[in-house]
Image: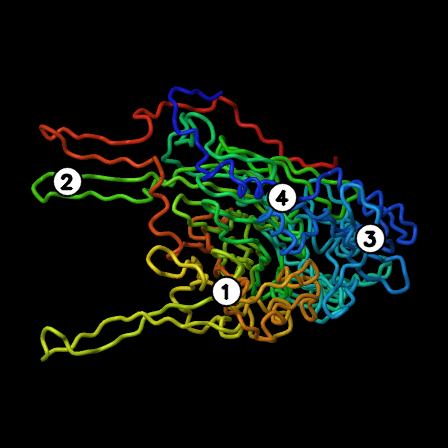
Amino acid sequence: MWCHHLLLLTTLGVSATNSAGRMNALHGASMFADLTPREMKNVRDYLMNCKELGLTFAKSKELKKNSILLMELHLPRKHEALRVLDRGQARPERQARVVVQFGNQSLPNITEYIVSPLPMPNSYKSKAIKGDRRIKFESRPISWAEYFHFNAFIEKVTMKAHKVLLDSTGFTYYNCSNRCLTFSDIAPRGLASGERRSWVILQKSVEGYFLHPVGFELLINHQNLDPEQWTVEKVWYNGQYFNSVEELVEGYDSGTIEKARLPEHDDDDLFSTYVPRGHSNTRTDMHGPKLVEPQGPRYHVERNFVEYAGWSFAFRVRSSAGLQIFDLRFKGERIAYEVSLQEAIAFYSGDTPAAMQTKYIDAGWAMGTSDYELAPGIDCPEIATFLDMYHYYDTDKPMHYKNALCIFEMTTAMPLRRHFNSNFSGGYNFYAGLENHVLVIRTTSTVYNYDYIWDFLFYQNGVMESRVSATGYIHATFFTPQGLHYGTKVYNYVLGNLHTHLIHYKVDLDVAGRENSFETLDLGFQEFTNPWSSNHTIKQSRLIRTPRETERSAAFRFGKKFPRYLHFHNPNQQNKWGHKKGYRIQYNSHADSVLPRGWKEENGIPWSRYKLAVTRHKDSETTSSSIYTQNDPWEPLVSFEDYIRNNENIVNEDLVAWVTVGFLHIPHSEDIPNTATPGNSVGFFLRPFNFFDEDPSLSSKSTVIVRPGKDRKPVVQRWTPEVVGHCVSNKPFVYDGTYSGV
């Protein structure tokens, strides 16, 4: 229950609220809305009734089957969408992209279809793949059915090593009770295209099992669609390799190998748990500060359309990759057509085979579908607007994810602008300041051990920030002395493995129109005779502008000098002062390459070669990665290098900036039990650069000005109520955490 003592601003801050531009934006937002459960069910039913496809249920245990793997919105072409957004024309028909895995045929393959029109589909056609390439069946993500057989296979294999595991760890996989082992699988699955061989790590099945490797890893060949034909190709135990489980057991029983013996497990001293331990200096009989909205929200959400303080945009959460925003406008002018997450990778190093092989490419795990429930007061403020998400991935019905996205306004506890103007005589001429409120739209992706918190933030001065914060459990392997070259010992038998996170974004800028150009601004020193003292010289910095006229000239490799300012502007539009209207991209990142160019798995992530690349917009270049790259990085279906290989002209064109951010993570003891977010947040800003005639936040009525009046009594000038009031929620904490079919 919220208390409402005072009347604050009720305006949404949207200029020309009833204007045609706003109505077109609202009208067009639904083009980008994710598929509804009804649409998903109708697409499923339609395709299941197409007898020529021979589809069956995804949740059946058979691997030799034809079934739907993924279903998500198929976006309209940009020029079609702009006719709706700019002219108010009729929306194009909604379509679904459907990924079907055909395992029940002589040549198994993956085929993508475009199904339309929605909500009542009556046709499908194959989705064109660049170069008419076939999607290899081995590149498909792991399904529920395959994991079912993984578990059964590992149980069968470890039955032979039951004594080894029990003696070494006190835990077992086969026929276990309260001391069970589980597993984590590693990708990519092999060493060359067309393979499907996975290393798995056995771990104690306890809370935070990611931190409990037991020194036993298996290489499983699971390429055959008959699980009875699966084989173990290698075993790694306590730093030693074996060609089979039988070879390990024979060596263990004969005493010819080095045995491992883990410390006795203590359930009451579980280092991986969140349960507090140690002394706290924080009072526990009261809550910390909370975010409140004394009169309710100052933003407006209508389905997938959001307005706030001059901003408006549409959003969706793509099942394969995650959060996207479209038609981003500020004070009625479009800044960007699309800003979207493309990919997230984490490439590891280590001494165990699984650690050496771990190169996670998260779209291959359907990163967008792992946006689980957000906890009020922790993941988002209690006052946030929580929205549900629906996904159709490796399922037979839409899955409902409650409260998976949140939107809220917050104060940063830092002024947006302020100045204290001293009179240098113990007083002041004036003080002025402006509260810094921002709107945040947030989702998370929990891709097994790691949790990524995805934010888009919208400031009152026309700045947009994209930020990702990493938390969750580190990826840990069994400690060996050689492992210290690749990480840090974080427990007596656990190594936290070093890794690099890289995140890739697509930023389709439309700065004052679609015709944009790109230049970089840097500084160079100049020296000249001092004009007012000819016996001296002056040395100072001078602005150097470098037009980037081709795609290659606008692709900046890691390891090379990176310009200070990245300026996208419209050559045909000027502000009041004669400057070309522009926006710049500003980085908050310390990313670097993960592998040398052209090295095997690096071929699947060529976007990771570039801190920034700028291309001409093409509807055929919608994404920089795919769900198939994880399991076939050697011959990827989507290769970003193709986007810039033709080196097209980018002067006065519709431009797309491809932004890579990230950080190196060398785990340390403070990552136990979890990696914390401070210092692990990276991203970028979109900042106006001569786009406006002055700071657009000047229109904000949250400004306060103080001047000395008569008898030095301060005179406060403000445009909001003087007293804020005291409001807090009396709702108890509620969290469910389930997601289910609908």
Mark positioned earlier in the residue sequence (1 or 3):
3
Measured in 3D between alpha carbons, the distance from the residue under mark 1 to the one under mark 3, in whole angstroms, is 54 Å
Residue drawn at x 77%, y 57% as measured from the top left = 112
Measured in 3D between alpha carbons, the distance from the residue under mark 3 to the one under mark 4, in whole angstroms, is 46 Å
Marks 1/2 in contact by CB < 8 Å: the verdict is no
Q: Which residue position is annotated with label 1?
A: 484
- What number is the disc on residue 429? 2
Residue drawn at x 47%, y 31% as measured from the top left = 297
Q: Which residue position is annotated with label 3?
A: 124
Q: Nearer the viewer, mark 1 or mark 3?
A: 3
Three-letter code for the amino acid on which mark 4 is drawn: Val
Mark 2 lies on a secondary structure that is strand
Is residue 401 left or right of 247 when viewed as pictured?
left
Q: Nearer the viewer, residue 219 or 664?
A: 664
Mark positioned earlier in the residue sequence (4 or 1):
4
Q: Nearer the viewer, mark 3 or mark 4?
A: 3
Residue 161 falls in image quadrant: bottom right
